[in-house]
Structure formats: C-alpha cells, structure tokens
Image (tube, helix red, strand yellow):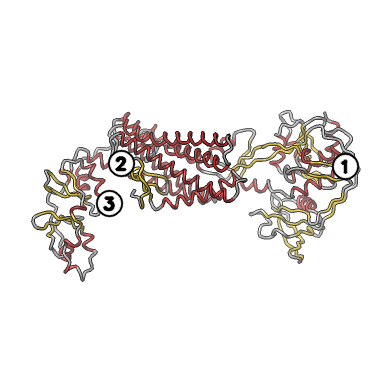
Amino acid sequence: MEPTFRLTRLRGIPVGAHWTWPVAFAVVAWTLGASVFPSVYPDVGGAGHLLMAVAATALLFVSVGLHELAHATAARREGMPVRGITLWLLGGVSDTGGDAQSPGQEFRVAASGPGFSLVLAGLLAGAAAWGEGHGWPTGVHGVLEYVARLNVVVAAFNLIPALPLDGGRILRSWLWRRQRDRLAATRSGARAGQAFGVTLVVVGLLDLGAGAGLLGLWLLLLGGFLVRAASAELADARTRHHLDGLTAADVMASDPGVVLNDTPVSRLVEHPPAPVRTGYPVLGGGRLLGVVVLAHARQVPAEEAPGRRVEEVMTPLDDVPMVDATDPVVDVVGRLNGTNATGQVVVVADGCVVGILDESDVAGALDRAPRVGARAPGGRAWAMVAALCLVAGAALYRPPFVIVSTGATADVSDDVSVSGISVTPVNGRYVVPSVAFRRTNGLATLVAAVRDHRRVVPVSRVHAEAAVPGVTREVRILAAAAAALSQGLPATVTGTGARVVAVRSGSPAAGVLHPGDVILGVDGQPVTQAAFLGELVRAGAVGTAFSLSVDRGGQVTEIPVTSAAGGLGITAETRDLAVELPFEVRFEGRAAGGADAGLAYALAIADILSSRDVAQGRAIAAAGTVDADGHVGPAHELAATASAQAGAAVVVLPQEQADGARGDGRQVVGVESLARALEALSTTV
C-alpha cells in the first residue's frame, strides 16, 4: 500500500499515511469522546472527554506505528529490505522488500509486533497505576489505562492464526517447518484468513441488522480487507512457487519489438509491433532512450497523433526500472507495479540492454511452469480453522440478549429521616438489590446462560419488564403515607392525574401517548394518582383495550390503547401530588431502586414509626409496589428474582410471586398488604 503523504522517519524508515487514516482517526476520536469516555468517566466533563478522546486516539495510532516499526526493525535485523510503514483505515502496514527465507526468520519477524504491543501495554498500564496513586488527573491516567487495554486488543487480534495477520504468519512458520513446504503452509494460513474474514463480514452484517451501525461497518471493512489480503497472499505464494529458480533472463522478451523515437504516435497506435505488448523499447541514435506504453499513446487525441512523435509520450529510460539478467524473477515481480509508470523493467547484462520484461512475460512463464499442487490442509487444520471462526464470531457478535445479574444492595433505612414525632431506630436492614443489565458478546452470553446466579433474557423482554411505572420521589412519599396509616396515623394523598414522563419505544403507547400528557381516567373511572392508573391497567388481562381520558395541552380527548405484557409501556407520575403527614420525612441520599422499592421503603418507615422491633436485627429484602393505602402490588420479575438472591435472612414479596422465589433455604414471606408484611415480620424470627 502506497502512502498518500509522508509523516516522519523512524530509525531511517519512512512513515506515511494513506488518505483513509485521517478518516479512521476522526471516527475513533468521535466514538471515544461521544460514548466511551462519558460512560466510564462521567465526572470529567464534555471538554475533558474531547481532550481524552484526541489524546487516546493519537496514542493508539502511535502504538500501531510502533507495532509496525517493531516488524520493520526485526525484518532489517534478518537482512530483509524495508521500504516504509503506512498507516491507514484499519491500522498499519510494513512494506518489506522480500519474503522470509526460513521458518525461523518468518517467526521472529511476525512475533516482534504483537510482542512489542504487549510490552507497551504493560508500560502504559504501569504508568496509569502509578499516576492514579500519585494524584494525576483522572483524564491522564484514564487515557493511559484505556490505551494500554487497546494495545492488548491489538496484540490479541494480530495473534489470530489467519493470514495476513501476524498470527497467520506464525502459523505459517510452524507449518513450513513441519511440512517443509512453504506453499502448503501459506495455503493453510490463507484459507484460515479467508474464513476469518468471511466470519467478520457475517458478524458485521448481523450487527448492522441489530442496530450496531459503527461496529458493524468496521467489521465489514475489516473482514473484506482480510479476505482480499489472504487471497493476495495465496496468489503471491503460488506465483513465487512456480517462478522459483527462474531469472529475469529466463522470462524476459529478448526481442520485444522496438519503436524508433521519431515514429508518429498515430502509426504506433494503428500498427503496433508484433506481438502486441503493454509497451515497447524506444530506440534513437542506436541506443535505448526509454519505453513507450501503448495505452499512453492511445490517450493522445486523434487529430494530434499524426504530428506527435513517440519520444514525446515515452517514459525516459531514467524512469524505467532496470534489473540484472541474473536477478531472480520473483524479486523482479514487485518492481512491475507500484511506482513503476510503465509496468515494465529493462533487463541488462554486463552493462548492455538484453531485453525487456513485463507482466505478460511473467504470465507466460507461469503458464509454462509445471503444475505441482500444494499439499492440501488436513482435517485437523480445517477443524482448527472452524473452531477459530466460531470462537471469533461468538466473541465479536452481540446477540439481542442481555445478562441479568444481581448487583449491590442498598439499605433504604439509611435514606430515611423522620422528625416531629416519637421514633425508634431500625435494628436491622431493609435492602433493595440493584439489577444489572449487560449486553455483551455471544461467548459471554453463552457462558452466563449456564450459570445459576445469572439469567439471559431477550432485550425486548428486558424493556418490557424493567419499565418503571413511577418516579422515585413519588414512590418514597407514598411509602411514607402507607407507613403512617399502618401505624394508625393520619395521611392524606391528593393528585390531579397521572402525567406521562416517558414512553418506551415499541410499546402500545408509542406514537399514541406523549410525555406531558396527563391521564385523567380509564374507561370512565377517574385517575387522580399514577398508582391508580397502574391498578386499573393491571386489573385487565393482556390485550385489553382501554379508553384513556387524556389532557393534552388543556384539551381532553379519548385515546384507545391496548395493553401488552409490559402494560402500556409508559413511565408516569402523579400531577400536583400532595401528601399531608403528621410528621416530617426527609430522604437523605440517592433513592434506591424504582417503583419496586416502594414496599422496602414502607417497611423501613413503618419500623421507624413503630414501637416494636420489626427488623429484629435481620437483613430483610423486599420488592413490590405499594400505594398510599398500603396495598402491595407485584414487582417486576427481575426485581423479585434479585431480591430472592440478595442473601437476606427474610425476603418479602407480593403473594403471587412468593411461591416462585422459595427454595435454597430462603425464608420468603408472601403478602398482599403492608399491614400483613409488618405482622409477618414481627411474628417471624
């Protein structure tokens, strides 16, 4: 690959960049700054994320350049010429002037790049750890740590045993030494490279279909490159195999037909010397002046061709590569393209021109060469290739499933402070476990599917089950009202409707209801609180058609909606929510959980208000909704499962979900009301 522009020289080796390199730099920097760093380092800020992204991208491409420099340095050490290094869209390429002459030489050059990347990863990780311990800014040690991980990824990817990757060259060196047949070894490595490239293309298409546009496009490009590069490796190996032992003199055309320098261009175009070739030597004054390419001559306008001379359109001899007649033809092939404008080389012997050589001469030599088939890969090799592709595909593909696991637990009693009335401290903990949703690759998803403490569910199901029907402040204040009533204290809750906060895409309400809409009634029954809306919807079976009275911009309209497994698919809060309590309740910290934490909050506040020791020193996990009257509603299935697995002494769940959570020695209490839950906890030890 020829560079579009030069960047620098490293150890005497020119380093350039293809025009696609700035595109790759911009895409990587944008991805890091827009999504990766904001999610990992949310406190850094927008400008900080941009600086981190640019710095990390620059370090990454420097790392890739050093990876290629390691290859180039090793190649020079082995006596192989190095023309330069080119950075491009998918990484870097070292342009060496020849192939390895032995398996050992191939191995040492191939292994140098991944080895250097791993060493660099260790250095960057060490610097990041040292900087974090010595107070470096988060952005600085964060960039170093991330680029260290990327260098490990670069090394791991390049070690995949598929040509033209470094791992494919290492595989070829091993097969070459074992089989004593370089062509057979190349064929095995190239087939692995083609299969791996096709795997990346398939995964990329699947990711595009799943909405992972940038990742899918990247994999498509990388897979296509690997397929083409592996095919080129195999074709080059076959060419070198068939031309092995031949010299330029064996292949050249010793009488290629000549053209005098003063010949009109029109005559050359109309009557080229036989046989027709790509180009012809141009003679003048008894000596070789250059080479005229027939295609260049044909570009001269027809009206100008009679008055133009061949010497005007020829390539001067100084610009035509020359090779010695004794040079191996396999070394000459590389000089027929690239910067060679004529596609030909002049062959000399003892300082005299003896012939000319172009691709047609090489093709003729290949046609005349005996066809000796390379040894086909055995079943073991194909099994390895298949396993490689399966593992790689599973590691790169992100299926439409998520891993659901129980995260850290929060003690809601730490969030509650009650004043203005006689209270007692909680002797125990009321815990709400968090539920973590992680979408990852197919390999990790498969492993998680067979582990007992995790679940794998479709993404669509998570959206349906994890929808939060209420907002945290409302959940907590309604829990306080229910706790007050459970202790015989007055509590008054009022509202003027259920305001839509969010609408889940793909739900029954999508395109029908909008944020800001206020639901005033369901099938003629008034709705003054969001909790009432939930009760009315849950009372109907899945697929029930409801008529909602909706206040939209001051105008009330009737809107039909049919429920699904996840309800209506909206998040709602009570408009103008007002709660009057005979005490003051404050919530000190960040709320734990969503609507499913209502039961835990109600239990904790009731314990504070009660003169009895309800918790009795125990850790009590609870999941379920609760309204101001103390009615307990079902928790989402994932929240109920997480509560059952939280490791608490007692688990309190809605009655309809308690049976499914029993087992493994857990003490599970099923309740329909807050009063029943308090009674069960007070009488259970």
Residue topped by disc 2: 82
Which of the numbered marks, if any, corresponds to residue 530?
none
Relative to 8, 566 lies left or right: right
Q: Residue at x 16, y 62 (%)?
A: 310
Quarter of the picture containing the C terminus is top right
Mark 2 and mark 1 lie on one chain; the one further toward the N terminus is 2
Residue topped by disc 3: 339
Kindly report the distance in space between the C-alpha atoms of the residues bearing marks 1 and 3.
88 Å
Mark 3 and mark 2 lie on one chain; the one further toward the N terminus is 2
Kindly report the distance in space between the C-alpha atoms of the residues bearing marks 2 and 1.
83 Å
The image position of residue 516, as x and y in percent, is: 72, 59
Q: Residue at x 59, y 44 (%)?
A: 41
Q: Which amino acid type is marked by label 2?
A: Val
Residue topped by disc 1: 486
Labels 2, 1: front one: 2
> Quick check: can you spot residue 435?
yes
